[in-house]
Amino acid sequence: MAAVKGSKQYQMVVVPHRPLYKAGIFCLFLIAMMAFSFLTYEYGMSQGLATKVEVVKEKDEIKAQLTGANRLISSMRQEVADLKLGGEVDTRANEEVRHTVEVLQDQIAQLNEEIRFYKGVMVPNVEEKGLRIERLDVENTGEPNKYKYSLLLTQVVDKHDYVQGGVEIALLGREGESERQLLLSELNDAKQTRIGFRFRYFQNINGELVVPDGFVPEEVMIIAKSSGRNGQRLEKKFDWQLSGG
């Protein structure tokens, strides 16, 4: 056959027709893919299982650490509570000790005052001797306008003979805008004008004063008069100051 001028010529190759060969190649490919998939699945499962075991292990460790931390927190809370309780006990004990010391100091001061008082009465070393108005204490009785008083008289002499006489008490204060003086007879139900005394060393005179409504005491005037050949007349003012409840 004559070749057509100007057209491209192709070479033809003849191969044998083998359908079983192609089917075998395809089966091998499928088997290889299945094997790869199986191996991949097994690998993933093994890795997943290992990861799960690791996660469970870490979870158990964290749980154990959390339990230990909770125990430590509880222990520290108990220690804090114990320290707080101990601090409160120490504070209470310190307060009780401080109060006891203050009470003892007050008692010592009172005893020293009494010792000085008795020394002054029994062994006088002052130039001014004779009858003395020593001290006045006024306390609230808890009843309205009613007060109790304690007046201490002493005798400072070298030779302690009995001294006797009487005491007058007056309150100086204000009623409204005016100054006023109330005598003892106006301050007790018995209308007593004077209080008698008789002693060798000292004497406490105790009584009650009833102050009228509207009267505001400011001072207490004490007048003590002793009788006899060497009689004395003493006057002494005390500020109105309550020394008790």
Image (tube, grey):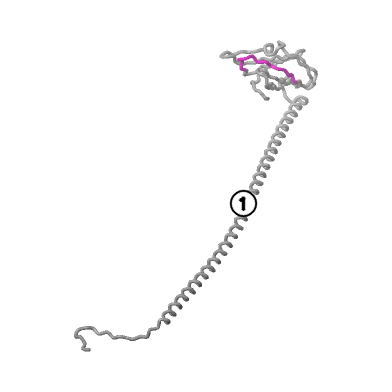
Query: Which quadrant is the N terminus positioned in?
Result: bottom left
Closer to the camera, 5 or 114?
5
Q: Nearer the viewer, residue 201 or 128?
A: 201
Rendered location of residue 194, percent (x, y):
72, 12
For this orientation, the residue located farthest to the bottom is 1
- In front of the other: 90 or 178: 90
Q: Magenta includes 242?
A: no
Q: Is residue 150 above or below residue 97?
A: above
Residue found 63% across the figure and 13% down from its top: 181
From the image, tell me which residue sits under label 1: 73
Q: Which residues are magenta?
A: 204-216
**Quadrant housing residue 212:** top right
The quadrant of the picture occupied by the C terminus is top right
Q: Secondary structure at mark 1?
A: helix
What amino acid is found at the position of numbered circle 1 in the picture? Ile
- Does 242 sit above or below residue 88? above
- Pick whichever, 136 or 208, lies toward us: 208
Mark 1 closeness class: few <14, some 14–19, many ≥20 residues within 10 Å: few
Q: Residue at x 69, y 11 (%)?
A: 185
197 relative to 2, above or below:
above
